[in-house]
Amino acid sequence: MRTNLNPFVGSVLLCHFLSAFSVLGMTLFIPQILQNLDANLPGYWVGLLFTLPSVCTALSAPLWGRFADRFGKRTSLLRAQLGLIVGFLLCGFAESVPAFGMGLFVQGMCGGTIAASNAFLSTQQKGETLAKSLNLTQVSARLALITAPILLGVTLQWMAPLQVYRYLALLPFIAVLITLRLPADTPSTEPQKKTGEVSHTRALNLLFILQFLFCFAMVVTYPYFLPYTATLGAVEEGIVGVLYSLPHLVYILLIVPAGKIKIPPQGLALLGFFCLGLSCAGQYLLVSLEQLWPLRLLFGIGVVFCYTGLNRLLSAQIDKARAGRTFGFIDSAGKWGGVLAGLGAATAISIQHSATPFLLSAVSCGLAITLLASKTGSVKIHGNTEVY
C-alpha cells in the first residue's frame, strides 16, 4: 500500500493509532482483568463491561460533536485524548470491579477519538480528498486491531494487566503533545445554512441507518468466531487468528487502490454490501475449513467497498461549521450497531449455533442493499452532482 500523506494528515492518523492501540488492544483481556479483581464475579459481567465504553460513546458522540463545532475541532480532539488518559489511569489503579468499570465509563464518555479525528481532518480537507482520509483513519484502527493484541499479549506475560493500563496512558499523552503542534481551527459562530436543508437531513438520516447496518454486519460476526471455526475443525490458535485478521489485512492492502476507482459512491456501497452479505451467507452455510479462506477474503473486499462508498457519501455532506456534529452523529450510529451486534450474536447462538451470527450479518447487508437501491436518485447530495 502506497500513499502520499501530507504532514497534517499523517500526524492525525498517528495520533489516532496511538489512541486506538490502547482501546482496541486491552478489551481482549477484560476477562482476565475481572478474574484478577474478583474470582467469583458472574460471567455476564464480562459482556456488560465489554460493551460499556461503546454504549457511552454512542450516547456522548453527538454531544461532543456539538462541542467540536462550538469550541474547535482540535480542542475536541485534545479533549478526547485527555479523556482516554484519565480513563486508562482509573482502570490502571482500580482495586475493585466498580472502580475498573468507572475507568471504562470515562473512556467511553470522554473518548471518541475517531469522530474527533475525522472532524479535525475536515478543517483542512473536503470532498474526495476528505473521503480518502476517512478511509485511512480506518487503516490506523485496523493496524491497531492487528498489532495491539499481539504486542500486549507478549507484555502481559511479565506484567499485570492493570499495570499495563498505566503505561498505555502514555500513548494518548504522546498524541496530545503531537496534536498541540498542529494548527488550531477557528470555530464558526454561525452554522452555514445549506440550500437543500431537507435533502441534507434526509441524506444524513439515511447514512445513519446505513452506517448502523454496516457496523452491525461486521461486528456481529466477531464475538463467537473462535467457537465457529472450531466446528469447522480449526484447532490451531494461530490459524484462527490469521482467519480472524484476514479481512483487516485485506482492508489495509486494498483501501488506497479502491479509493481510485471511478464508480459513483452509491455503486461502491452497493457492491460492498453485496460482497459482505455473500461472504457471510457463505460462512453461515459453510461445511469445510478450506472454503473459509476465500470467504474471509471476500469479507475484507466487502468492507473495503462499503467504507469507500459510505465515506464518499458522508464527505459530500460535510461543511466545516457542522462537521463535529455530523461525524458525532455517524459515529454514534456505528457504536449502536456494534452494541446491538454483540447482543444479537449472543442471542443468535443461544437459539441456534455459532454460525448464526453470519446469517444476521447477511440479513443486515440485504436490508442495506434494499434501502440503498430504493433511495437511488431520490436524495440529492448537497454540493455534488451525484445522487443516491
Image: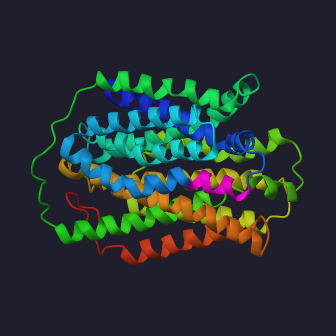
Q: Is residue 178 visible?
A: yes
Instruction: For the C terminus, give its image quadrant.
Output: bottom left
Could you tell me if residue 263 is visible in this image?
no
Residue 209 covered by magenta stretch: no
Judge from the rendering whether residue 229 lies leftward or rightward of residue 382; answer left or right.
Answer: right
Q: Is residue 18 above or below residue 368?
A: above
Q: x, y (%) of residue 280? A: 67, 63
Residue at the (58%, 40%) spot, across then down: 24
* Quarter where residue 122 is shown: top left
Q: Residue at x 23, y 65 (%)?
A: 200
Left or right, 275 with respect to 17, comes to: right
Specify whether 387 is left or right of 156: left
Q: Which residues are magenta?
A: 42-51
- Observer-nearest of 126 and 69: 69
Residue found at x 28% / y 49%: 324
Q: Residue at x 62, y 57 (%)?
A: 48
Q: Position of residue 201 (x, y in %)?
A: 25, 68
Residue 75, image quadrant: top left
